Structure formats: structure tokens, C-alpha cells
Image: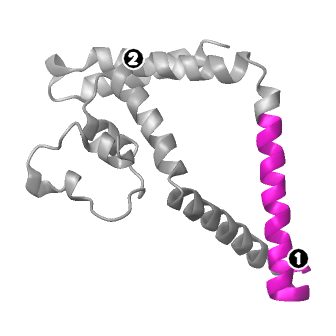
Amino acid sequence: MRFVSLLGIGIIILVAYAVSERRDKAPWRLVCMGLVLQAALGFLILKTYPEHIFGAADGLFKAIQRFSDIGARFLFGGLADRKDFVILSMASVIIFVSSIMAVLNYLRVVPLVMFVFARMMQKTLRTSGAETLSAMRMQTTHGDRSHDSPQNGAASDDALGALYGG
């Protein structure tokens, strides 16, 4: 039963190869390194005491839920506690999380995390900065984004550095 997922990955790769127009140009090193990164991440999550990490994440998300419930009660009063107004509690969580992400983005935490993961992908998969950046794409920069504009022709490998000023 454990090998069903390996069989699934193999079938997906074979189908992608079969429908490819240019089979001779298949980037096998990129595919293999991507699979190695997935296996390493899976090993890290499943074999290295994940209960501590997931326990901390669970506590964080429960705290976020509590904070957003308090905010909804403050804003909507007794309507927030009614079961037929579920949208109010959902909206409060969405607004709270998006405001936290906006603050983390402003403090440059989100770009730093993306920069670290993008550099790791760039080094292990040997992709260019522009390829890696578009794979990790989120709205993370403030101000000028001319480094990835189509007028510049081929995108520069320095696009990752421009993301976090490195």
C-alpha cells in the first residue's frame, strides 16, 4: 500500500512525457531534483518529531481563531455568536489573517521567507532566478517592479536578489 503514491507519481511523469511535444528536451535532472526535494520535505515532516511543530502551529491557529472571534464580537455584537450568521465569523478570520500577512509583508518577513525558499530551489534545481521567482510568485515587493518587466527582454537572474534587496 505504501508504494501506491510512488506508482501515482510515476504514472503522472509518464503521462506528462507521453503528451509532451518535445520528448528529447525533457528536463530529467529538474524532475529528479524536484522529486528529491519532495522526498526530503516528506521525510522532514513525517520522521522528525512533527508533533512539536504541528502542536505549535495548532496553538497559533487556535489563537488566531480566538482573536478573530473577539474582534467579530466587538464589531458585530451578539450577531457574531449566532449560528445562522456563519459568514461573520468566517469574514473575521479572513480579515484578521490578511491583515497579519500585510504586516508581515510590510516588515519584509514574507519576502525573506520566499527569498530563502527560492534560493534553495534555485541552487538545487539549477533554475534561473526568473524561473524560480515566477514559481514562487506572490505580491511581495513594494514600489518599483521594473526588474521583471517584459521591456527588459530576458529576465535577469538578479530578480531574486531584487525581491529581497540581496
| Coloration mode | one colour
In the image, which disc is placed on residue 33? 2
Which of labels 1 and 2 is toward the front?
2
Label 1: element kind: loop
Residue 15 in the image: above or below residue 1: below
Q: Secondary structure at mark 2?
A: helix
Q: Are marks 1 and 2 in contact (CB under 8 Å)?
A: no
Q: Earlier in the sequence, mark 1 or mark 2?
A: 2
Q: Amino acid at mark 1?
A: Lys
On residue 83, the disc is 1
Residue at 28% x, 15% y: name it: 28
Residue sitting nearer the eye, 135 or 166 = 166
Indicate the position of residue 153 as horizontal and vertical percent values. 8, 48
Residue 75 can be seen in this image: yes
Which residues fall within the magenta stretch? 54-83
Bin the neighbour count of mark 2 within 10 Å (Cα to Cα): few under 14, some 14-19, many 20 and up.
Answer: some
